[in-house]
């Protein structure tokens, strides 16, 4: 049967089982919107800015293992979407972004709302396509979903000119697709796995360090099993939180720039480091020269060969899906007569316990002001640690990472790689849509929330009862912290003046707003907000302006060169 | 260290900019880049000459392999290989210099492709260093124009790059 390009596109989305498309209409995508209108299987969520559409598709994907889909128009629709696409790219989030384009005959003519979408998005996508012939449309969409979700996942952009959505072609959706130039290695090399197991079992001071790869590959049960089998300490990166249960006694907390003292010390002083789906980035290990230890052996599992030995030389590289490799390793360990060196392990744990006695996450609990850490701790307690928590970027993000103990994967949704302010609220929309009965909290700050505040309107339209926890310190807190530490307290442009009344603002959008100014009111307000199951509640917590995130490894310094609270 | 990378890529619009974009985005050097379709018209072969430490070259190779349109990458300098570059050079050739210029072209096994009463256009092939040597052998001011293709390379003997 002959179908138009627009019909084909929607049929493809149906074939892929797409539930929601997050988007914003415009001239170049009118044919597609017309077809969306005529059917009910694929539901459309109308955002208020294209950045929000992509973040929402991103949050949807992160919290559900599914591929998020966004639809935007040409020109400004695309340029507005770029921040969202780059955010997803840096965190390897599977996503398909369909962008309208001016008609093929107008491409290159500086047409109205034209931009070089493929050119602009090229450095921040896993791959992108410009569909010039309607006959290629279905297979291109198939390829886009295949590329987005396999290997190291990532966003794929499909640019569709308007005339292609009008032209007709025979529709047949390919069942499978294969590309001769794209064959990610998925199974770990058996010899390397053996070597890794041997090295792990011989370790005297082992450390397991895991990242976002564990979450993306749904490998947390395999990881948990292996870590418990070995009895070794385990730390997670910001992107890896929830990959191993945070309440497990073997968990030493997050590592890195704002990681725990014990995790960073153990990373530096271990003799065998086992890295799983993590990439040794600058916020995680600090200065690679300082991190280097001649007597430390490193095992690294990653789906992406280019992540291995990029910043840190690795002794036993294993390319493959982390879940499969971890399972293989567990089998080897179980069938091996060798056991970890119990005496060495006992001494190593004693050392770690000693580091833990620093109690690096303690803060002033007697303050008359609301401590942001306290709000996060209370949120953790009241939600039983079982909420989906999104965040924006800055101090509040680090406090959630430190004080909300994630026991499950895909509960912690944040922009780790690109560090995109404005991510939290739209991401929470995607999370809430795919988890309609779950508690979804967006922990944010008064600076970040204003970057995508317009999405409060989308939340109203789709009845998304998100709980916004605004840690309002009237500063761009992390910028202020760096200015305090490294710029002689010169707070250049980091003060948030002329703030809106967030309670009234929430009410203006049709939501509930609460302002909380005393520590004693924190718990009550959180309980009250969570009891409002059907409503979005904006909780404006007026917090201590001078609070800082500790520990802190200053940028470019060694991982153990931490500033602790007491040292100030 | 100088490396010659041979790359088989899908012959698709945008593949070249994806590859050159990768080099600029990650701060890698390109000394020269040549590209043309192979005997299989769906595929192009690219030769990139780059400079970097072993670690950098390893990253470049991995990053290239990660591009969806890249089918295969080989570092020719890892083994025996042949490298050739073509240069066209227009030189001043008038009066008594005319014979000398012809002799020099012969020494470098160049061919004179075009002649006017004031100039020769000479074709030269060889490794980059041979072409450099020819240019250095010229008296200052003799060269009117040069154009070079950049290196192309192929493995020696049984070393074959194909799908």
Image (spheres, rainbow, N blue to C red):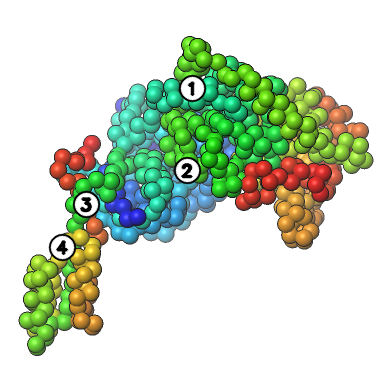
Q: CA distance from mark 2 to mark 4?
A: 38 Å
Residue underneath mark 1: A197
Closer-to-camera residue (A468/A8): A468
Q: Is residue A200 visible?
A: yes
Q: Is residue A558 above or below residue A92?
A: below
Residue underneath mark 2: A310
Q: Is residue A176 left or right of residue A263?
A: left
Q: Residue furthest front?
A: A343
The percent position of residue A555, horizontal first and vertical second, equals 64, 50
How would you rate the neighbour count of disc 2 (Cα within 10 Å): few for under 14, some for 14-19, many for 20 or more? Answer: some
Labels 4 and 3: the sequence-earlier one: 4
Q: CA distance from mark 1 to mark 3?
A: 42 Å
**Res A399 quadrant in image:** top right
Q: Is residue B49 above or below residue A73?
A: below
Residue underneath mark 3: B153
Residue sitting at x 19%, y 41%? B159
Q: CA distance from mark 3 to mark 2?
A: 28 Å
- Secondary structure at badge 2 equals loop
């Amino acid at each position: 049967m002959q179908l138009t390009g627009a019909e084909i596109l929607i049929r493809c989305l149906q074939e892929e089982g797409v539930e929601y498309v997050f988007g914003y209409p415009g001239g170049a995508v009118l044919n597609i919107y017309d077809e969306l209108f005529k059917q009910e299987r694929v539901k459309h969520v109308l955002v208020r800015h294209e950045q929000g559409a992509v973040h929402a598709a991103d949050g949807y994907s992160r919290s559900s293992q599914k591929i998020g889909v966004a639809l935007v128009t040409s020109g400004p629709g695309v340029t507005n979407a770029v921040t969202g696409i780059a955010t997803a790219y840096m965190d390897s989030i599977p996503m398909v972004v369909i962008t309208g384009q001016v008609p093929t005959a107008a491409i290159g003519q500086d047409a109205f709302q034209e931009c070089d979408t493929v050119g602009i998005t090229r450095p921040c996508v896993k791959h992108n396509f410009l569909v010039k012939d309607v006959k290629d449309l279905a297979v291109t969409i198939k390829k886009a979903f295949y590329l987005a979700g396999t290997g190291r996942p990532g966003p794929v952009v499909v640019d569709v000119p308007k005339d292609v959505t009008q032209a007709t072609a025979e529709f047949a959706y390919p069942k499978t697709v294969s590309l001769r130039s794209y064959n990610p290695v998925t199974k770990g090399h058996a010899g390397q796995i053996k070597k890794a197991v041997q090295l792990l079992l011989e370790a005297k001071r082992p450390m397991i360090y895991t990242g976002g790869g564990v979450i993306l590959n749904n490998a947390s049960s395999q990881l948990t099993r292996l870590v418990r089998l070995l009895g070794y300490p385990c730390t997670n990166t910001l992107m890896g939180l929830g990959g191993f249960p945070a309440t497990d006694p073997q968990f030493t907390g997050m590592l890195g720039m704002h990681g725990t003292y014990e995790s960073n010390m153990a990373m530096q002083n271990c003799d065998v480091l086992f890295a799983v789906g993590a990439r040794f980035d600058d916020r995680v290990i600090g200065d690679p020269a300082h991190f280097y230890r001649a007597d430390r052996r490193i095992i690294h599992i990653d789906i992406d060969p280019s992540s291995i030995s990029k910043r840190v030389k690795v002794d036993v590289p294993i390319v493959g899906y982390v879940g499969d490799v971890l399972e293989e390793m567990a089998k080897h360990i179980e069938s091996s007569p060798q056991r970890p060196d119990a005496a060495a392990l006992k001494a190593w744990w004693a050392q770690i316990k000693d580091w833990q006695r620093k109690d690096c996450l303690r803060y002033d609990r007697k303050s008359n002001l609301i401590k942001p850490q306290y709000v996060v701790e209370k949120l953790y307690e009241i939600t039983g640690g079982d909420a989906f928590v999104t965040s924006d970027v800055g101090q509040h993000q680090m406090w959630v990472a430190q004080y909300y103990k994630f026991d499950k994967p895909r509960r912690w949704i944040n922009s780790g790689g690109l560090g995109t302010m404005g991510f939290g609220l739209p991401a929470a929309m995607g999370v809430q849509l795919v988890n309609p009965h779950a508690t979804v909290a967006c922990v944010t700050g008064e600076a970040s929330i204003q970057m995508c505040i317009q999405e409060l309107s989308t939340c109203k339209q789709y009845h998304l009862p998100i709980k916004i926890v605004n840690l309002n310190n009237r500063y761009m807190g992390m910028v202020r912290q760096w200015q305090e530490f490294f710029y002689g307290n010169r707070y250049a442009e980091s003060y948030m003046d002329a703030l809106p009344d967030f309670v009234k603002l929430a009410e203006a959008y049709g939501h509930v707003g609460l302002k909380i100014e005393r520590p004693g009111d924190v718990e009550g307000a959180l309980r009250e907000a969570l009891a409002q199951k059907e409503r979005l509640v904006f909780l404006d917590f007026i917090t201590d302006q001078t609070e800082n995130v500790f520990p802190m490894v200053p940028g470019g310094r060694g991982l153990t060169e931490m500033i602790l609270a007491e040292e100030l | 260290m100088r490396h010659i990378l041979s790359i088989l890529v899908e012959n698709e619009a945008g593949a070249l900019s994806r590859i050159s974009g990768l080099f600029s985005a990650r701060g890698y050097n390109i000394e020269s880049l040549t590209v043309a379709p192979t005997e299989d018209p769906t595929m192009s072969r690219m030769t990139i000459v780059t400079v970097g430490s072993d670690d950098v070259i390893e990253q470049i190779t991995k990053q290239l392999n990660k591009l969806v349109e890249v089918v295969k990458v080989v570092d020719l300098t890892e083994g025996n290989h042949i490298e050739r570059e073509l240069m066209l050079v227009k030189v001043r050739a008038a009066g008594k210099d005319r014979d000398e210029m012809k002799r020099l072209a012969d020494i470098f096994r160049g061919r004179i492709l075009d002649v006017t009463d004031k100039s020769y256009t000479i074709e030269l092939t060889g490794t980059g260093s041979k072409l450099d040597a020819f240019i250095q052998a010229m008296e200052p001011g003799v060269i009117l124009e040069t154009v070079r293709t950049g290196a192309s390379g192929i493995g020696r003997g049984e070393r074959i790059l194909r799908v």
